[in-house]
Image: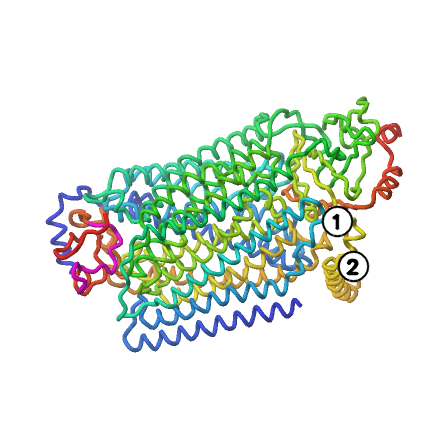
Amino acid sequence: MSAHANELAVDHHDDHGHHHKETFITKYIFSQDHKMISKQYLITGLFMGIIGISMSILFRMQLAWPDHQFTIYEVLLGKWGEDGVMDPSMYLALVTIHGTIMVFFVLTAGLSGTFSNLLIPLQIGARDMASGFLNMVSYWLFFLSSLIMVMSLFVEAGPASAGWTVYPPLSALPQAMPGSGAGMTLWLVSMAIFIASSLMGSLNYVVTVINLRTKGMSMTRLPLTIWAFFVTAIIGIVSFPVLLSAALMLIMDRSFGTSFFLSDIYIAGEVLHNQGGSPVLFEHLFWFLGHPEVYIVILPAMGMVSEIMATNARKPIFGYRAMVASILAIAFLSTIVWGHHMFLSGMNPFLGSVFTFTTLLIAIPSAVKSFNWITTLWKGNLQMNVGMLFSIGFVSTFITGGLTGIILGDSALDINVHDTYFVVAHFHLVMGISALYGLFAGVYHWFPKMFEGKLMNKNLGYVHFWITAIGAYGVFFPMHFIGMAGLPRRYYTNTAFPYFDDLTDVNVVISIFAFITAAAQLVFLYNFIHSMFYGKVGPKNPWKSNTLEWTAEVKHIHGNWDGPIPEVHRWAYDYSKLNSDESDYVIAGQDYAPQHIPLQENEEEMHH
Amino acid sequence: MTAFLVVLVIILFGITVLQLSKILNMSKSAEKLGEGSEVASEKDNNINGWLMLGFVFFTYLLLIVCFYKWWDVLLPQAASEHGSTIDTLMFISMTLIFVVGFFTLWLLSYFSFKYRGNSTNRALFFADNDKLEFIWTIIPVIVLAGLIIFGLFTWTDIMNVDTEDDPMVVELYAYQFDWRARYSGEDNTLGEANVRLIEGVNQLGVDASDPNAQDDVVVNELHLPVGRKILFKIRSQDVLHSAYMPHFRAQMNCVPGMITQFSFTPSITTEDMRMDDEVVAKVRKINNIRREKSKDLAAKGEEALEPYEFDYLLLCNKICGSNHYNMQMKIVVESQEDYDAWLATQPNIATALKK
């Protein structure tokens, strides 16, 4: 085998020019290879995920047993957990940083960064990204922003704690809360760098998809993963700069005395000079990114789920064109619905009507996608690999979480559930858990492409999936109820309101499920690290998939294919396609026809 | 109760672990048979297919248990006129969600179970069907059109304040971490105010020279006459807050630098609401919990909790700082006479500022 490979390497040496000597630093640290960069993204993302989830464990403990003293608070939080009592400001800091880390660092960079980098070149048949250098800079800026975010946890007055949406004036005035001092400054710096990193990544993805597709890979033959990454990158380019402008203006307001977002404020015994600004302006700017952001998080997961589901169902994805159309529709609509976070912000109620209309429209492409996934399963031959289970789980949580969006997107109904735990339950299911399922599905499915053919242990994978699936619903179903009971989110404790005394039980149940679910992630972590080193090496194409990445070399080489890049002759979903006389599959005895296989003699050309 | 729930959770967890250990054992024996690959075997397909079927029942069961255990924590009937429309719309949307969720989740799990992989099976090459796509595009379109229209009419009704109704103007004033209310007095017009005028007892920065301000009344407990339309003018002194009155299905943010508004007509007095069956049951449950807690506290030698009596609440529902969780004001809805009598006992601004 290896002798053969060497021969090929010699034969086609001209094909992939630059084979220079790799040092440890160029190979593992300042690597410009998309496969290494994707691993760097994943591992940084997972590390941030551990921090984010650990924080949620701490505040879930506080919510379930507010009167109880836990020494662990003192151990982990120091002066904010003296005598085992959590400081209310620290509680807010934990929810703030949990939100920031999970949304941006785990589900944006860890998900889109990892898989866009890994899969775009491999699935479109490219040697690497359009600009390997830009890609490297993008990762290192992400690393720097993660570092600053983690550092901000250790500043004296505490990290940013105005909520992950950092609405001013709360986030602008250190007099309003301790976290709005140095912690907030670091938060803004970190986010500004993060945005730069995200933009560099996105531009690279777009250029690569447009320019570097291999021969025969027309846009309509792209796997849905690539469509999703491509459109996600475009949304990122459109919306992230707006967040940057908001962050810059907030920095100005905080440090240079401007009044973009501040007006008529009396705090800590004095009137501030600021006049004429409006916090509502910040909300507009923030949510102009903030809403597309949830699609930046969920679209890549959708793309990967489509791909993994088709492969494991041994069936083409149902309604490929409708799937692409709904990705585009969702992307377009996502940029004109931001106001549904602001129905009660004091903006003109007429705008509320407009945003209700556009918001509920999103339900249409979402419904189309869900039905298409379900139909993909219908009459399939489902291979229950762990990636497949997470993909089915994704559709389940996307439905249960998405449906409650019909309530929240309706301005009239939003009045009473806005900012309650109902919202928390909704978005955790529809974008948090769903996107995490997408991430896990992707990791289990493409692990062999990341770690040179090694597979993750399936039994640990099954344990991980089933506990997570049950635990996640155990956490978020009951949470809808405390939201409908009128309990506002971001309350350090409910004990100030005897009216909410009967919700303590519910909180205990939620927390117990949360601990179990979090514990299951340790199984994943163990499996991931163990398989990275000792995983069993499977076949070159373990899931019998059609896409090009499985034709690339198992061993990581710069340039992906040792020989010439394969040419593409068909779309990515010719699973279980029969020949014209329906006597056998197109390729006899093999229920899949990979993209690089030319049309067979007795095959009817049906798609693309 | 808590104990029961904990036990329930432990049982569910136990079942999970048991099932999982079964999988592990089965796959271990499979390994002995030489199926040591990390790719799903037929046995894995079978077990996970069955578990998928079980999963949908788990989802239904969880929902039923949640409803059974916690139906009573939900908010009681709406105490405002527009609130019942919101509740109807909520009920319709919820019904829709349950029906759609029930069927789609069933299909998802049932297909996962029914078509679990098998080496003799052959998947159907089924890539497109315009008719199906059309059906599940058009159905959501129609259903959503209905919901959007109902929702928008409701929203517009609530948010458009008709001055012909002659609403009573009341200011809600938010600051870290408490509320004040200012009644506009006989002229039903609030005097001008700005944070720059805050000084001493003039906590709300009311312009003392404004004739409209003289009869304004500042209080820290909100009293509302039943059946009278109230127009709240909402201000904030420092950061964003949100005036949330869940029992009235009412909420609006408090934004420094601008005046926001929300209007509703309270329809049930506090006294009547205390007699409402759901509220009675809820209060009884809460008091049982508080009695249990008091026992623990007494054992530790601490003060017992006071018994709880129902009151309407105004809560802060926008993160506003460390005491966000305890920024509340009591609301009393009473008859016009009681309200008038109460208001007469409160000093107006002209007198208050003179002191």
**Vertical arrangement, residue B18 with respect to residue B248, above or below:** below
Nearer to us in this view, A322 or B195: A322
Image disc number at residue B312 = 1
Measured as percent of width and height from the top left, residue A172 is found at 60, 34
2 or 1: tag closer to the N-terminus: 2
- At label 2, counting other C-alpha atoms closer than 10 Å, the crowd grade (few under 14, some 14-19, many 20 or more) is some
Q: Label 1 is found on which chain of the structure?
A: B
Measured as percent of width and height from the top left, residue B320 is found at 65, 41
* Left/right of residue A396 with respect to residue A413 in the rendered view: left
Q: Residue at x 13, y 52 (%)?
A: A8
Nearer to us in this view, A605 or A217: A605
Is residue B227 among what the camera can see?
yes
**Vertical arrangement, residue B52 with respect to residue B231, above or below:** below
Q: Quadrant of the N terminus of chain A?
A: bottom left
* Left/right of residue A553 with respect to residue A511 in the rendered view: left
Q: Residue at x 76, y 32 (%)?
A: B204
* Left/right of residue A234 with respect to residue A348 in the rendered view: left
Q: Residue at x 53, y 54 (%)?
A: B96
* Amino acid type, residue under disc 1 in the picture: Tyr
Which of the two marks, 2 or 1, is nearer to us in this view?
1
Q: Label 2 is found on which chain of the structure?
A: B
Measured as percent of width and height from the top left, residue A581 is found at 16, 61
- At label 1, counting other C-alpha atoms closer than 10 Å, the crowd grade (few under 14, some 14-19, many 20 or more) is many
Instruction: Identify the image quadrant of residue B152.
Output: top right
Residue labelled with disc 2: B305
Numbered disc 1: secondary structure: strand
Residues in magenta?
A: A570-584
Is residue A150 among what the camera can see?
no
Numbered disc 2: secondary structure: loop
Image disc number at residue A573 = none
